[in-house]
Amino acid sequence: MTDNGAPTPADDHTESHDQTVPEAWSKFMREGWDDREVEVPEHPITPWAAARRERLSGIFPGERLVVPAGTYKVRANDTDYRFRADTAHVHLTGNQTSDAVVVIEPDGTSVLYARPRSGRDTDEFFRDRQYGALWAGARPSARELSDSLGIEVRHVDQLESDLSGNTPTRVLRGVSADVDKLVVPAEAARDEEFAKALSELRLIKDEWELGELKEACDITVRGFTDAVREWDQVLKHGERWIEGTFFRRARAEGNDLGYDSIVGGGSHATTLHWIDNDGPIVPGELVLLDMGVEGHNLYTADITRTLPISGKFTPLQRNLYELVYKAQQAGIEAIRPGVTFRAGHFAAMEILAHGLDDLGLLPVSVDEALSEDNKTYSRWTLHGVSHMLGLDVHDCASASKETYIEGPLQEGMVLTVEPGLYFQKEDKLVPEELRGIGIRIEDDIVVTKDGSVNLSAGLPRTADDVEAWMGQHL
């Protein structure tokens, strides 16, 4: 520290190419600022998040529970990736500021340990590239965070002392190395059990979450439409134009992309997670678009459509597309409370396996191909039909098999239904005219009391409707 108590460069996130700061400049910078706090309305997530913390505390009575938000990750040298708070932390608090930690005490009370903005009596606000208001924007004060999120807020510097003692403690590990060091695990299985519980807490979405997911789907539909409206530029610039156009909508109306957009023109569509998006868009071929907007509260959509680049399917393309559509429709119709999570998958695969058999591709009977100890049809389908959706595009990943993959669907769960057919261009076991064609159709489905609702129904699915939609906007 300097003699006047201001941080030295070693205390700040400064760089070797930054200017030196003489005392006169430093002193002058700390004078004459209007540094008042502002009135912040309560965030709509507040009562929902409080109820989630109460439920979680009830699962682990008498224990302290620690869930960090994480911190910045380096992209290159002194530049970081845009910060995105850990999913479990956001689910329990609504907080999206970095370096925060929520602690639920054994009596059920909660404290958010955060890094609020510093006062203007230090150099941080104009020197620190990571936290300084003049470099990175003003962070909320402790009071502003507390008023917004309805939770007590303390400075994160107090966390270490507050976590001392012999209280049984569980930590969501792997999010913050600093927090991991503060609590030595009694046994790894305890924290693994905690991570599982946090995932399972998100399996059933509440009313507020369903609204957030619907909004993300609606914005995503508009992003798809934006891309088609700019088809002349798409044909000129290729996959990159679609990626950039969709990202513009995601940033304009949401927070970000829910995941890297997949824009697969031609044979790129047969690469399941094609994110290079640097290829051409060629009339006469298909383009597979798997894209989703992450809303301001971090809930994401996940929608896929496969479009005829010329605006009309060829007869072969239409036949394959309608086979995938039929499989998807069967998968959606299978979704209802009480059936297993994989019911939609099995329904869709039944349709695709018979379709592949009609194309003369299966090396065995349909029944044998569909058996779990054979599955040769999967050469051309590759992936499961569903995954949970929410704050993560592949949500609830740490949930147990018994409650997720092997469990029953329940009202309020949200999952994708996304069958596909993929004929690799190097595949000598399919006719030449099929090689290089990839088709996937994906929608976001919420399980309701009597069945399901398609949250992404605003985007056309049938071949006729896709053609009409493209014709309207091209």
Image (spheres, rainbow, N blue to C red):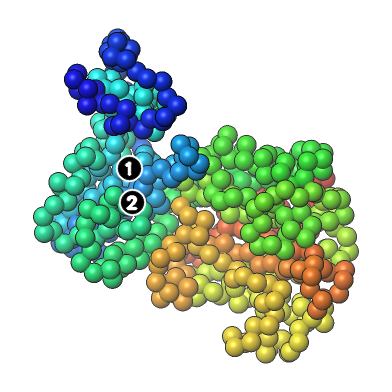
Asked if one can make out residue 414 in the rendered structure from this viewpoint, the answer is no
Screen quadrant of the C terminus: top right
What residue is at 58 percent from the left and 34 percent from the top?
252
**93 in relation to 412, above or below:** above
Residue kind at label 1, given as amino acid type: Asp
Specify whether 405 is left or right of 291.
left
Residue 176 is labelled as 2
Q: Amino acid at mark 2?
A: Ser
In the structure shown, which secondary structural element does the residue marked by tag 2 occupy?
loop
Depicted 226 relative to depicted 107: above or below? above
Q: Where residue 325 sits in the image (x, y, percent)?
A: 72, 65
Relative image position of residue 250 (x, y in whole percent): 58, 40
Query: Which residue lies at the image location 76% right of the left edge and 54% below the top edge?
Result: 265
Residue 323 found in image quarter: bottom right
Q: Which of the two residues, 1 or 315, is positioned nearer the viewer here?
A: 1
Mark 1 in CB contact with mark 2 (< 8 angstroms) = yes
Residue in the picture at 28% in, 71% down: 189
Q: How many marks?
A: 2
Give the labeled residue for mark 1: 99
Between discs 1 and 2, the one toward the N terminus: 1
Q: Quadrant of residue 188?
A: bottom left
Residue 111 point in image, percent of width and height: 22, 45
